[in-house]
Amino acid sequence: MTLLRFGRLDVTLDGSRAILAGRLDDSALLGPLLGQLPEGPITLDTAAIWFVNSIGMREWTRLVRGLRARGSQITLERVADVLMTQMNLVSELAGAVAIVSFHAQYLCGGCGAEHTQLVEVAPHAQALRMLAPPKLPCPECGAAMELGDFPERYLTIFK
């Protein structure tokens, strides 16, 4: 495994898998990361990204463009809530990446709990394409939780 640092963003490389943690902001210039990632399919785990700004999104988009230009298939796992909502604002990312799972804010009508839930895409793919978020069980009371925001903020990328 290799640990790289791009500003306030840590990237752990393990073969064709990269785990990103920290801030995706103006200090995270990701151009050099492209040269560190191997050819072929790439999996990016972004669960530990906790902040994204417009410059960070620019860098993220450039990274995706660079990977696609060299023919890499890009799979995203455990996409952070803050990155998911930003990616839905960039139309060129729709279809550019395959999302396996993502985090989203959910609310429980039963007990009032709020949780960031991990949504697995495969079992809900058809509903997600129709902007219909799945109801997930509340970790506190077991009742069905609902997405705590407008579906378009999370699901437009699946259309």
Image (tube, helix red, strand yellow):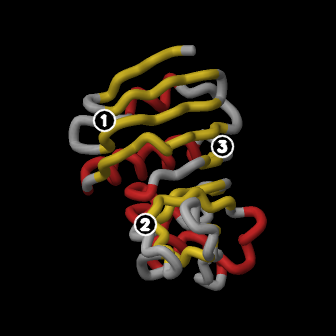
Observer-side mark, 2 or 3, equals 2
Residue drawn at x 54%, y 60% is 117
Specify the label residue 71 is tagged with.
3
Q: In which quadrant is the N terminus drawn?
A: top right
Res. 6 image quadrant:
top left
Residue drawn at x 54%, y 70% is 157
Cα separation, mark 1 vs mark 2, equals 33 Å
- Crowding near the residue tagged with mark 3, few <14, some 14–19, many ≥20 C-alpha atoms within 10 Å: few
SS class of the residue under badge 2? Answer: strand
Rendered location of residue 94, percent (x, y): 56, 67
Task: Give whichever of discs 2 and 3 has the lower sequence position.
Answer: 3
Residue 6: tell me if it is visible.
yes
> Tag 2: residue type?
Glu
Q: Is the residue 23 above or below the residue 120 in the image?
A: above
Rendered location of residue 109, percent (x, y): 50, 81
> Tag 3: residue type?
Gly
Residue drawn at x 65%, y 22% is 15
Observer-side mark, 1 or 2, equals 2
Specify the label residue 29 is tagged with.
1
Q: Which residue is mark 2?
A: 114
Cα separation, mark 3 vs mark 1, equals 21 Å
Toward the right, the furthest residue is 123
Specify the label residue 95 is tagged with.
none
Q: Is the residue 151 above or below the residue 123 in the image?
A: below
